[in-house]
Amino acid sequence: MRADRPGPARSSSPPRTAPTRLPSGAVALLRAAGITGWVLGHPFGKYRIDIAFPEALLAIEIDGWAWHMDVDRFRADRHKDNALVRARWDLLRFTWHDLTNRPDYVVGEIRAALAVASAAG
């Protein structure tokens, strides 16, 4: 973890927005690209990050219509985003369309964000 960026707040209560779906398309993409150091469903206070690179303080969130059709879920994700930014995490959001139709873009963005974090660390 980078010294200039505080870590997430911890909570003993279960996460209120724990994902009920796994971003399996993103996991397959990361594995195929040989990208390591990620954690699926990483705890962050009362939330869970879809895919986190804890050492780099990089959060990846995957957005799909099925998950965000519920207004409470949509709002909770915005609250999680704000909490991540306040804790000085970098946040990348991708859609299912990005994962399935623009995988090179997704991999490139993640690699670029990890390179920036590594250079700053």
Image (cartoon, rainbow, N blue to C red):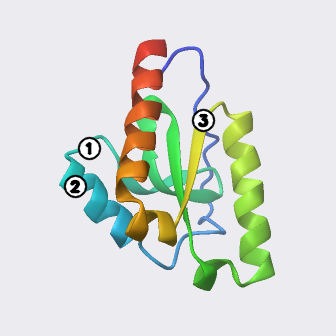
**Residue 31: numbered disc:** 2
For residue 108, say whether it is visible: yes
Q: Is residue 7 left or right of residue 68?
A: left
Type of amino acid at the residue the image marks with label 2: Arg
Q: Secondary structure at mark 3?
A: loop
Q: Which residue is mark 3?
A: 89
Can you tell which of label 1 and label 3 is closer to the viewer?
A: 1
Q: Quadrant of residue 121?
A: top left
Q: Residues within 10 Å of mark 2 (few under 14, many from 20)?
A: few
Q: Residues within 10 Å of mark 3 (few under 14, many from 20)?
A: many
Q: At 76% from the left edge and 58% from the top edge, which residue is drawn?
A: 78
Q: Is residue 6 above or below residue 120?
A: below
User: Which percent across, then down, holds residue 69?
Assistant: 71, 84
Q: Secondary structure at mark 2?
A: helix
Mark 2–mark 1 Cα distance, whole angstroms, equals: 6 Å
Can you tell which of label 3 and label 2 is closer to the viewer?
A: 2
Q: Quadrant of residue 26?
A: bottom left
Type of amino acid at the residue the image marks with label 3: Trp
User: Which percent across, then down, holds residue 77?
Assistant: 70, 62
Q: Quadrant of residue 94?
A: bottom right
